[in-house]
Image (spheres, rainbow, N blue to C red):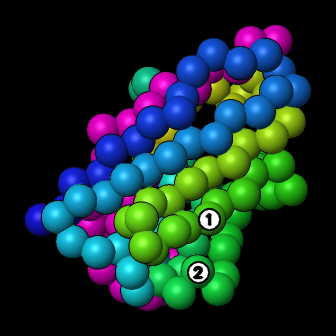
Amino acid sequence: QVQLVESGGGLVQAGGSLKLSCVASGRTISGYAMGWFRQIPGKEREFVAAISGSGGSAYYADSVKGRFTISRDNAKNMVYLQMNSLKSEDTADYYCALRFHRMVGTIPLEYDFWGQGTQVTVSS
């Protein structure tokens, strides 16, 4: 069993930055793909970013490309999402997820464990 806990969300003005963190416990995340998704109440959960098990490749949704950066520290069992140039449309609950595969996935069903989420609100 894996537990994922996100932190770092909050209220920020448009154009500002936030860094989300996700810490895993229960087993090592080394070698497994990790992803970030977001969801607005009443809407489907959407892919934001993912990083491969080795950390050698990352993939981003077009809507965040160039603004967000995903990274991982396997020694600390953590994954991060640096969010810059935030826009009001980035407002959502952000979720960290682990996939028992080394390759990234972009669909929620491809992920095996999820955190409880952290709220990000961007004011315009």
Q: Nearer the viewer, residue 121 or 25?
A: 25
Q: Tag on residue 55?
A: 2
Q: Tag on residue 71?
A: 1
Is residue 38 at least partly visible in the picture? no
Please, what is the three-letter code of the amino acid marked with disc 2?
Answer: Gly
Is residue 61 at least partly visible in the picture? yes
The answer to whether the residue labelled 1 contacts the one labelled 2, judged by CB atoms less than 8 Å apart, is: yes
Q: Which x, y percent locates residue 39?
A: 49, 36
Q: Quadrant of the N terminus?
A: bottom left
Q: Is residue 46 left or right of residue 22?
A: right
| CA separation in Å, label 1 and label 2 | 7 Å
Q: At 43% across and 50% down in the image, what residue appears?
A: 22
Q: Is residue 85 left or right of residue 45?
A: right
Per the image, label 1 sits on a secondary structure element best described as strand
- Farthest residue in the top direction? 124
Please, what is the three-letter code of the amino acid marked with disc 1?
Answer: Ser
Q: Nearer the viewer, residue 54 or 104?
A: 54
Q: At 63% across and 26% down in the image, what residue appears?
A: 91
Q: At 33% across and 44% down in the image, what residue appears?
A: 5
Q: Nearer the viewer, residue 98 or 8?
A: 8
Q: Which residues are magenta?
A: 96-124
Mark 1 neighbour class, 10 Å CA radius: few under 14, some 14 to 19, many 20 or more: many
Q: Nearer the viewer, residue 72 or 47?
A: 72
Picture quarter containing residue 10? top right
Does the stretch in magenta take in 112?
yes
